Image: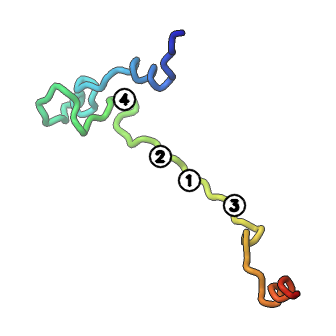
Amino acid sequence: MTSRPDARTRSRSTAAAPSCDGCFFRRHMLCALDRSEPCATFRPDREQGLHPPRQMSFAFRPERTTGTPFAFPSAAEQARRYAA
């Protein structure tokens, strides 16, 4: 039985490794470093240019209308409950 790699492993293995040749700063002659491997400031050069990644949107939950999930009984209710 041959084990197949899952989707995450496949996409990582087929994705191109980042290099200085694909860096936005190197292609636009903005890089001041003389290195052959990508550095911490590596940004991929894309058609849409240099822009921040899209952030997740925040969705507000509707306010609860059912009241509190648990409330302590009042003194009168406790007296009724435990009267012998």
Q: In front: 46, or 83?
A: 83
Task: Select label 4 or label 3 by which is in front.
Answer: 3
For the C terminus, give its image quadrant. bottom right
Distance from label 3 to label 1 (Cα)? Answer: 13 Å
Name the kind of residue labelled 3 in the image: Pro
Disc 1 marks a residue whose amino acid type is: Phe
Helix or strand or loop: what does disc 2 sit on? Answer: loop
Q: In this rendering, which labeled residue sits more in front, label 4 or label 1?
A: 1
4 or 3: tag closer to the N-terminus = 4
Task: Give the labeled residue for mark 2.
Answer: 55
- For disc 1, the marked residue is 58
Measure how far apart labels 4 and 1 are at the Cα level: 27 Å
CA separation in Å, label 1 and label 2: 9 Å
Residue at horizontal 24 percent and vertical 38 percent from the top:
40
Residue at 30% x, 35% y is 43
Instruction: Determine which quarter of the picture holds residue 37.
Output: top left
Q: Quadrant of the N terminus?
A: top right
* Residue 11 as seen in the image, left or right of residue 46: right
Estimate how packed mark 3 is, as few (under 14), some (14 to 19) or many (20 or more) residues with alpha carbons within 10 Å.
Answer: few
Q: Earlier in the sequence, mark 2 or mark 4?
A: 4
What secondary structure is found at the residue carrying circle 3?
loop
Where does label 4 land, which residue? 46
Disc 4 and disc 1 in contact, CB within 8 angstroms: no
Name the side, left or right, on which 28 lies relative to 50.
left
Q: Quadrant of residue 44?
A: top left
Q: Earlier in the sequence, mark 2 or mark 3?
A: 2
Left or right of 43 on screen, residue 10: right
Dot label at residue 62: 3
The extreme front residue here reads 84
